[in-house]
């Protein structure tokens, strides 16, 4: 699933963007594939849009911790401003002028995914 998502978004940002895949765990994820795919696609697109024009990187991988599978996405984009972190799962919240429908879909999908698994956003100190 992750490979096909990356294949679909990579052509949108091939200008010096490095995509790193690191699968520490290989197996079958039992989930609502449509919703998980939509969330990962939106996260990857948002990350790619926030990357610096040169030397940008997107890292996506899997890891196991205490019996739970994690899909981890990291990038070196400008990040989400602190004042927006508590709003990112709200329907219609967006900082983009033309993405209100996507924001609603993303919020709805994230709520659906959080009922199945732990979904969180963790800013990394730079």
Image (cartoon, rainbow, N blue to C red):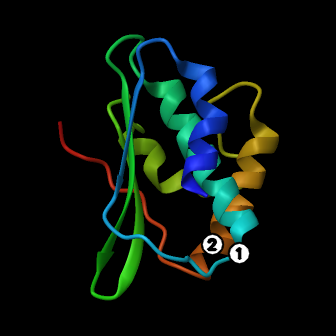
Label 2 sits on a secondary structure element that is helix
Residue 65 drawn at (x, y percent):
28, 79
Nearer to me, 113 or 37: 37
* Number of marks present in the image shown: 2
Q: Residue at x 27, y 87 (%)?
A: 66
In the picture of the structure, the residue carrying the numbered disc 1 is: 32
Q: Residue at x 63, y 47 (%)?
A: 4
Crowd band around label 1 with a 10 angstrom C-alpha radius: few (<14), some (14–19), many (20+): few
Numbered mark located on residue 113 in the image:
2
Res 90 seen here:
no
Q: Is residue 8 above or below residue 115?
A: above
Instruction: Say left or right for 107 vs 64.
Output: right
Crowd band around label 2 with a 10 angstrom C-alpha radius: few (<14), some (14–19), many (20+): some
Residue 81 drawn at (x, y percent):
40, 37
Q: Is residue 85 above or below residue 47?
A: below
Q: Residue at x 31, y 17 (%)?
A: 55
Res 38 seen here:
yes
Label 1 sits on a secondary structure element that is loop
Q: Of all residues shown, which one is farthest toward the left?
A: 126
């Amino acid at each position: 699933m992750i490979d096909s998502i990356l294949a679909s978004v990579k052509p949108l940002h091939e200008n010096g963007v490095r995509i790193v895949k690191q699968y520490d765990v290989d197996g079958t994820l039992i989930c609502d594939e449509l919703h998980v795919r939509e969330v990962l696609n939106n996260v990857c697109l948002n990350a790619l849009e926030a990357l610096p024009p040169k030397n940008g990187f997107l890292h996506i991988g899997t890891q196991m911790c205490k019996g739970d599978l994690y899909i981890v996405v990291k990038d070196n984009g400008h990040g989400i401003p602190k004042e927006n972190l508590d709003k990112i799962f709200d329907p219609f919240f967006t900082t983009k002028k033309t993405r209100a429908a996507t924001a609603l879909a993303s919020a709805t999908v994230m709520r659906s995914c959080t009922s199945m698994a732990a979904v969180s956003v963790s800013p990394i100190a730079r």
